[in-house]
Amino acid sequence: MGNQVEKLTHLNYREVPTADPAGMDRDEGPRIGVSYIFSNDDDDVEPQQDPAELVGEHPASQPYDPQLHEVECSIYYRDECIYQKSFSGDHTLSGDVGGGGGGGGGGGGNFTTYTPENLLNKCKAGDLIEFVCQAQYPHWAVYIGDFQVVHLHRLEVVNSFLTDASQGRRGRIANHLYRYKPLNPATVVRNALDQVGRKDQDLSWRNSECFAAWCRYGKREFKIGGELRIGKQPYRLQIQLGDKRSHTLEFQSLEDLIMEKRRNDQIGKAAVIQELSSHLQASEAVNEESGANGKPGGWTATE
């Protein structure tokens, strides 16, 4: 069938003309554009299970298969790939058996998950940490050394012990996902620590992933209002559906794209594939009907 390119961002949120929700990017002044309001909020305002409630449940010991639950996808800015999650050649699902290698820079260990205690043995200052759990938004943090992380949690940048920040979820080092050139580790740590205590309207990031990625790469695109929205859609989220099929969504900003990617992470691989398959079938039916009537279809396909 080929890769389906959808010009609209997504059916589950509304596009409204507005000023940037935070009023301005504090580096460059106000930016007027289009803001996307999502039907599902992100992890930092969603109710999270209190760590005290996890006593006796030991969620970290529950099996977690990234290939079963997570969506393979790539992010492109124009023609440049700036993010990729692909399980090709990745057959290692748990690094806690037999002392397997850690989530380094390549090969099958990239998406290996570990208990928080085992993850501590693999982290270096400046690393990005991603905590994952079925049916939850991934939670990102910056490791700063001494068993501690800085992360955006419930609309506040806080300094926590890694084991507390995990809330019992398994985690992995996520340095390899974004393809931007990282800052040096000392700068990454300083960026994170300088933001501790910022909260609510003083925040410049919508979620933990944008905050952690900004600390490591220093890109303003991760910040609220970091890009002008002028109608063009230079960012593409290519979602793999299996059987060499993919679906592509286009976005005006990286921030909007990350929000959609995280929504997919939260609802899970099976739900995303079912949702997109239903949408594509409906689009194909409309396209065939329009073709039969001599009218152009409502979407564009690329081979």
Image (spheres, rainbow, N blue to C red):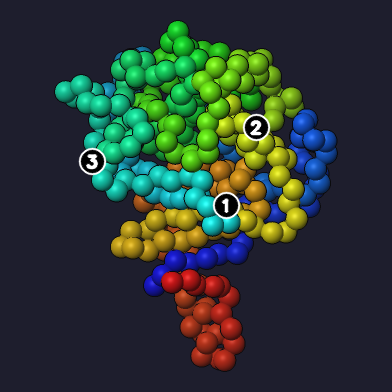
- For discs 2 and 3, the disc positioned in front in the rendered view: 3
Q: Report the Cα–Cα distance between label 1 and label 3.
A: 29 Å
Q: Residues within 10 Å of mark 1 (few under 14, many from 20)?
A: some
First along the sequence among labels 2 and 1: 1
Amino acid carrying label 2: it is Trp
Q: Position of residue 159 (x, y in %)?
A: 56, 13
Residue at 43% across, 46% down: 84
First along the sequence among labels 2 and 3: 3
Q: Position of residue 86 (x, y in %)?
A: 36, 47
Horizontally, residue 189 falls left or right of residue 99, namely right
SS class, disc 3? loop
Q: Position of residue 54 (x, y in %)?
A: 38, 18
In the rendered view, would you say 240 is above or below 219? below
Residue at 44% across, 15% down: 162
Query: Is any atom of residue 83 visible in this view?
Result: yes
SS class, disc 1? strand
Label ID, residue 205 = 2
Q: Report the Cα–Cα distance between label 2 and label 3.
A: 34 Å
Q: Residues within 10 Å of mark 2 (few under 14, many from 20)?
A: many
Residue at 52% across, 78% down: 286
Residue named by callout 1: 77
Amino acid carrying label 3: it is His
Number of dots carrying numbers: 3
Q: Nearer the viewer, residue 126 or 288?
A: 126
- For discs 1 and 3, the disc positioned in front in the rendered view: 1
Q: Position of residue 182 (x, y in %)?
A: 52, 31
- For discs 2 and 1, the disc positioned in front in the rendered view: 1
Amino acid carrying label 1: it is Tyr
In the rendered view, would you say 228 is above or below 163? below
Q: Quadrant of the C terminus?
A: bottom left
